[in-house]
Image: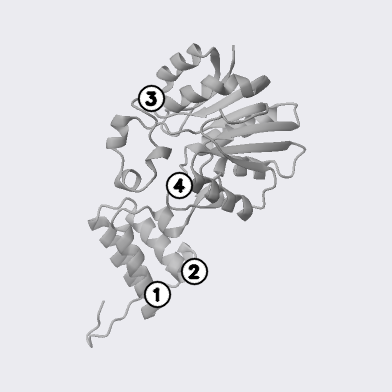
Amino acid sequence: MKNKKNKEIWTVKDVLLWTSNYFKKNKILSPQLNAEMIIARVLNCSRMELYLNHDKLLNPKEREEIRNLVKKRATHYPLQYLLGETEFYGYKFLVDEGVLIPRPETEILVDTVISYIKQSNKNNWNVLDIGTGTGIIPISISKYFSNTQNKILFVATDISKTALENAKKNIELHHIQNIQLIQSDTSKDLSGKFDIIISNPPYISEKQFQNLQKEVKNYEPKSALFGGEKGLTYYKKILQNAENFLNKDAKIFFEIGANQKDDMEKIIHKFNYKIIDSIKDYNNLYRVLVLEKN
């Protein structure tokens, strides 16, 4: 923006308006929120403070940094990768490029596991998280029970070395001591018995993958998204081996894709398990299944 004397003068208000409009033109979802988060990051303030100090003048270095981030976001590069972090279950998590970005739906999976542990008379738990990604599931559950009598030991696996490195950063960020990270595809390389198996595996089908948003399809790792032609490959792999790792009365908690419940029921029955609970998401679609052995 230039004034009548051709001197560039940018206030917070000016750059917010320009950035939001620029994102709209480039079909970025939630353009105002994206603008606020990027500008707040550069100015090291909260989004609320942007409006409390809307007349603040930006210096050339701040303008340049904002401009570079905005240009990159306009290519549909994910905001979470751009900022290097996201929020999940009320906590901040670091997110590196090459790792699946946490989704709000997975909070339902975390809630379901927490509710089950709270309702049990057990205090000591061995839990396996298959496909841990950024480590959000074991970390969130561990933090919830950090000041209780429940003692939970997690083994968290992922086939991706990048994901495990990212999970390690988050474990250190949140000062968690009870999570062991192991590089493994599903559970076939593990030993030991568990009271709970949790998994939010890749469950996007071939057809769904072709219709994903650019942010997801072009930038997030396909290996963390694509679950085979119908999106069910990894559930089958997990259930093939799960019995070898389950204690008596153990439960399996799966996050599933929209409209996968019917197909999942057939797979679960085939491997001699049964669904004891199913939980819907915010769109009234089944999102979490709780299993036990027949």
Q: Residues within 10 Å of mark 1 (few under 14, many from 20)?
A: few
Please give the label number shown on residue 259: 3
Name the residue type under label 2: Asn
* Residue 240 location (% of width, % of height): 52, 20
Q: Secondary structure at mark 3?
A: loop
Q: Which residue is mark 2?
A: 44
Q: Secondary structure at mark 2?
A: loop
Q: Is residue 59 above or below residue 192?
A: below
Q: Residues within 10 Å of mark 2 (few under 14, many from 20)?
A: few
Question: What is the CA distance from the residue labelled 1 to the residue labelled 3?
Answer: 46 Å
Label 2 or label 4, whichever comes before in sequence order: 2
Label 4 or label 1, whichever comes before in sequence order: 1
Q: Which residue is mark 4?
A: 99
Question: What is the CA distance from the residue labelled 4 to the residue labelled 1?
Answer: 28 Å
Q: Are marks 2 and 3 in contact (CB under 8 Å)?
A: no
Viewer can see residue 55 = no
Image quadrant of residue 67? bottom left
**If the image is split into quadrants, where does the N terminus sit?**
bottom left
Q: Which residue is drawn at the image coordinates 40% and 23% (left, top)?
A: 260
Q: Which residue is mark 1?
A: 62
